[in-house]
Image: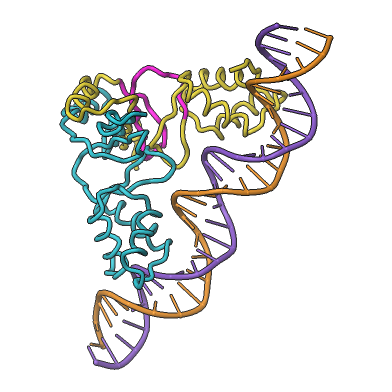
Chain colours: A cyan, B yellow, C purple, D orange
DNA sequence: TGTAAAAGTGATAATGGATATCAGTTTATA
DNA sequence: TATAAACTGATATCCATTATCACTTTTACA
């Protein structure tokens, strides 16, 4: 994979924004932060897909409509608050033996897995409504 | 929710097919099995969405492109084989304390969660290639 | 360095899953 | 059994994502 200025900007912007953005959201962040960089939306999609395939970032499945992306590639889970729609990281230690147990139980080879929780985050519980 | 002949057919067909079909696939199964029922694709989408919302079936997120649906609503996980593309059920006991641990750890209220494993199933491991 | 092949880009058309619309039909109730 | 509410099928539309393609940038190596 050759170097590209655009990919560097995309990766760097994803790293600096912990919001687990979609491709579209990241595109708009970049346009806001660096209007002169002139990166096309297809380039954002293209590079997010490639970085996710190569493992340098992670694609989060199962949230809502669109895919979200995460700079943090170490094993962890996600929580989607149905009130504020924010995505939170959940430590993987909540299910310490899930991989070993599943491989033992099924005999399947597991490359990766996603855990997504849906519910109401702490902040949204304390607000009225 | 009023009774409808179409919803009954959709639910029944989903129950009789353990393949975790997408809306489109289910639509085609129904057309094949009951060509005279004349159910529209929008009706299939509409009723799957509504039954998933009401809890009588489950929507499986995080597989590939399209959403898949499952008649089995008791807690269990899914495994997607990247060779044969089949979806397998995984018993929830592989992560027995995931909900309690996560609520304790975060203080979040968890309504539901999805676990999707990706890898290679047993059959595809034994075949050459 | 100079240059050609390979890789990447931006604009935009195309794709495909899902939803909205709407006139007509079916179901529930009183 | 009449009326409102719910539902349907056909299809237009939406929207996230991918494909296409002419052009630009990067890399390898002479």
Task: Tell me the quarter of the image containing the C terminus of chain A.
Answer: top left
Task: Look at 21% across and 48% down and name the residue there.
Answer: A72
Decide if residue B49 is in sight here. yes
Instruction: Give the percent coordinates (x, y) of residue B119.
Output: 31, 37
Quadrant assignment for the N terminus of chain A = bottom left
**Residue B89 counted in the magenta span:** yes
Q: Which of A13 and B114 is in front in this view?
A: A13
Find residue A58 and report its horizontal and vertical position in percent.
28, 48
Q: Which residues, given as a range, are shown in magenta?
A: B69-91
**Residue found farthest to the front:** A128
Q: Is residue B29 left or right of residue A75?
A: right
Image height of A1 relative to A80, above or below: below
The residue sitting at 34% across, 43% down in the picture is B129
Q: Which residue is rendered at x = 33% and y = 50% of the image?
A: A21
Q: Is residue B122 visible in this depiction of the protein?
A: no
Q: Please name whichever residue, D21 or B40, is drawn nearer the observer in this view of the structure.
A: B40
């Amino acid at each position: 994979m050759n170097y590209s200025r655009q990919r560097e900007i995309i990766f760097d912007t994803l790293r600096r924004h912990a919001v687990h953005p979609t491709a579209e959201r990241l595109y708009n962040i970049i346009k806001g932060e660096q209007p002169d960089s002139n990166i096309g939306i297809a380039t954002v999609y293209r590079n997010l897909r490639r970085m996710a395939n190569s493992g340098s970032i992670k694609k989060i499945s199962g949230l809502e409509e669109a895919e979200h992306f995460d700079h943090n590639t170490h094993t962890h889970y996600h929580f989607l608050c149905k009130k504020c729609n924010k995505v939170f990281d959940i430590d993987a230690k909540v299910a310490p033996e899930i991989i070993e147990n599943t491989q033992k139980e099924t005999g399947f080879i597991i490359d990766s897995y996603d855990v997504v929780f849906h519910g109401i985050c702490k902040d949204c519980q304390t607000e009225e409504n």
